Image (tube, helix red, strand yellow):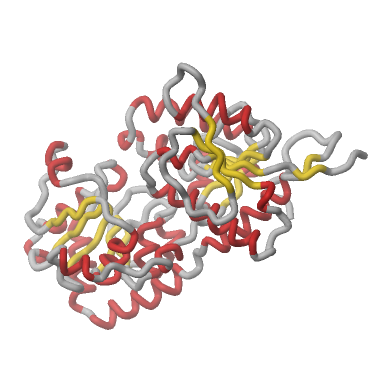
Amino acid sequence: MGQERVKPIVFNGKFLTVAPTGVHRVAEELIHAFERLVISRRSAIELSDVTVVAPTSAQRKPSFSMIGVIKRGFASGLPREYPWEQINLPWIARNALLVNLCNMGPVFHFDSLTMIHDAQVYLTPASYSLGFKLWYRLIQPLLGRTSRGILTVSEYSKEQLVRYGVAPAEKITVIHNGCDHVLANAPAHGFVAASGLDEGRYVLALSSTQSHKNIRVLFQAFADQRLAHLTLVLFGAASKSTFESLGFEVPPNVRFVGRIDDAELAALMIHALAFACPSTTEGFGLPPLEAMILGCPAIIAPCGALPEVCGDAALQADPHTPDEWVEKIMSLAADPKLRAHMRESGQRQAALFTWDTAARKLAHLLGLNVLDRPGEAGPTDMQSR
């Protein structure tokens, strides 16, 4: 039997080429937590064996303290990051264990772990462009076959990936996201008053036109006169004109604050009456957990992974019944004891989801897969130990 050789680990850094979304946030926070874990010597992996490889076009600079970021060019004559990921990256990482944390990775790098966060392109195809859907539906099942293992962020997502044939259950490992990153920055409390908002007099939600985000039900709820004294505050890229161009009727008590930074978002969450998440499906549901850990009561639709991660610590309302959203919001506004109870139970539930826990599970899986054993064939059993 030959000697075991420890392979280097390469994280796919394509996520550094675009403005961060929820998926990109997960990648960055997970790598940060993994780095902290290794520095604290709670993992046998050496950071000298770990790098992030990104295209030369990557503009974002993550604040990793010891993990290096290496930039390499795009495939000659081919546009942007998708061919880089399929052509350049597998060659650059040819002798390494490649870790893809953002739904995609090179099909022809067989020594890889790939995190697929959800099955939304199958569950809610109307939320995506035709090209995006076709690409994901082509590549992800191939990754399910060629990757050593598939990671995902909830038991619900695992079930859906199996249901749609992306990967078999025995090849999928669940690593729940953390939400404690929101505790790292001091909230910009002044942003609330500067935005013309009063504490406890508004409900916060993510502004998105994707059909499964289901913002329409919140517009319908806030058009009800019973909520006329409250404001719906939407943060994110989608503006009032964006919604109106798509035929949405936006009530007058809806405020759009646009893209905001983490400190401003934390302040909005802390001072809100509630955080509303009416999605008809979510692979995880990070925003309501972020709100909960900051002491903001959450109201969720009982759909996708939301009940799995929020448990009984969030109020629930039917995603297609505006009146239920009105009633749940009114109950929080009228009952200080209910608000206090939901605040406390929400913080307890959200505290279960930390990046340290996620990093320890990732480090364990990496440790199982970085030993190069001559004479052995096939992937390491992702479900062992």
247 and 258: which one is in front? 258
Q: Give the quarter of the image for residue 298.
A: bottom left
- Seen as rendered, the residue at the extreme right is 1
- Seen as rendered, the residue at the extreme bottom is 337
Please state if 148 lies on the left or on the right of 329 as rendered: right
Q: Residue at coordinates 38% horizontally, 29% vertically from top-left?
A: 132
Q: Residue at coordinates 24% horizontally, 61% vertically from top-left?
A: 204
Q: Give the quarter of the image for residue 10.
A: top right
**How far across and down, in percent of the image, does residue 347 sit?**
41, 73
Q: Does any portion of residue 34 appear in the rendered image?
A: yes
270 and 316: which one is in front? 270
Please state if 281 lies on the left or on the right of 111 as rendered: left
**How far across and down, in percent of the image, does residue 246 sit?**
16, 37
Please state if 106 lies on the left or on the right of 25 as rendered: right
Q: Residue at coordinates 21% horizontally, 73% vertically from top-left?
A: 331
58 and 292: which one is in front? 58
Please state if 4 lies on the left or on the right of 336 as rendered: right
Query: In this rendering, is residue 295 above or below 43?
Result: below
Query: In this rendering, is residue 112 above or below 217?
Result: above
Total marks placed = 0
**How far across and down, in percent of the image, does residue 113 sit?**
62, 41
Q: Quadrant of the N terminus?
A: top right
Q: Quadrant of the C terminus?
A: bottom right
**How far across and down, in percent of the image, does residue 207 sit?**
24, 50
Q: Does any portion of residue 150 appear in the rendered image?
A: no
